[in-house]
Amino acid sequence: MPAVNQIEAHPYFTNDAVRGYGQEHRIATEAWSPIAQGEVLDDPTITQISDRTGKTPAQVVLRWHVQRGDIVFPKSVTPSRMQENFELFDFELESSDMDAITALDRGEDGRTGPNPDTFAYIPG
């Protein structure tokens, strides 16, 4: 049994069925592409919460993951963004914020990466 399952998970693709299976079997979820390759950062719901909390949209989304119990390793090479990514633990999202972000789920239409059920790797 794996201890961690790295899956695509972000507000546009919550992947709750796979996350739920993991929770039932004590498998931690690591969010791959936690900010949907930046696609969620301009979403009006995210920016409204960002404005109200005084946090950046990325911080809001990463905090959403943390409060859901996801493991996140946001990727950045920019020192200021790296610092920003560490500043997730001095605020909490309200339950209404969590629900509003989760409601952004688009199912399969929200996926930004390949579907592992249909992806075929063909060595070059």
Image: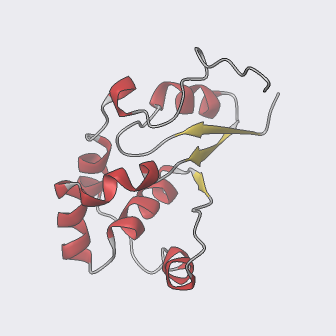
| Quarter of the image that includes the N terminus | top right
Q: Which colour scheme is used?
A: secondary structure
Residue at image x 22%, y 65%?
47
| Quarter of the image that includes the C terminus | top right
Taking the view exactly as shown, the residue that stands out farthest to the right is 1
User: From the viewer's perspective, is residue 56 above or below residue 120?
Assistant: below
Residue at image x 32%, y 59%?
41
In this rendering, position of residue 20 left or right of residue 27: left
Q: Quadrant of residue 109?
A: top left
Front in this rendered view, residue 89 or 9 = 9
Q: Where is residue 55 in the image (x, y as percent from the top left)?
A: 32, 77
Residue at image x 61%, y 34%?
23
Residue at image x 25%, y 59%?
42
Q: Position of residue 89 (x, y in %)?
A: 50, 76
In this rendering, position of residue 33 left or right of residue 6: left
In this rendering, position of residue 113 left or right of residue 36: right
Q: Where is residue 64 in the image (x, y as percent from the top left)?
A: 41, 57
Taking the view exactly as shown, the residue that stands out farthest to the top is 118
Front in this rendered view, residue 75 or 50 = 75
User: From the viewer's perspective, is residue 123 above or below residue 9?
Assistant: above
How many badges with numbers are in the image?
0
Q: Position of residue 53 (x, y in %)?
A: 26, 76
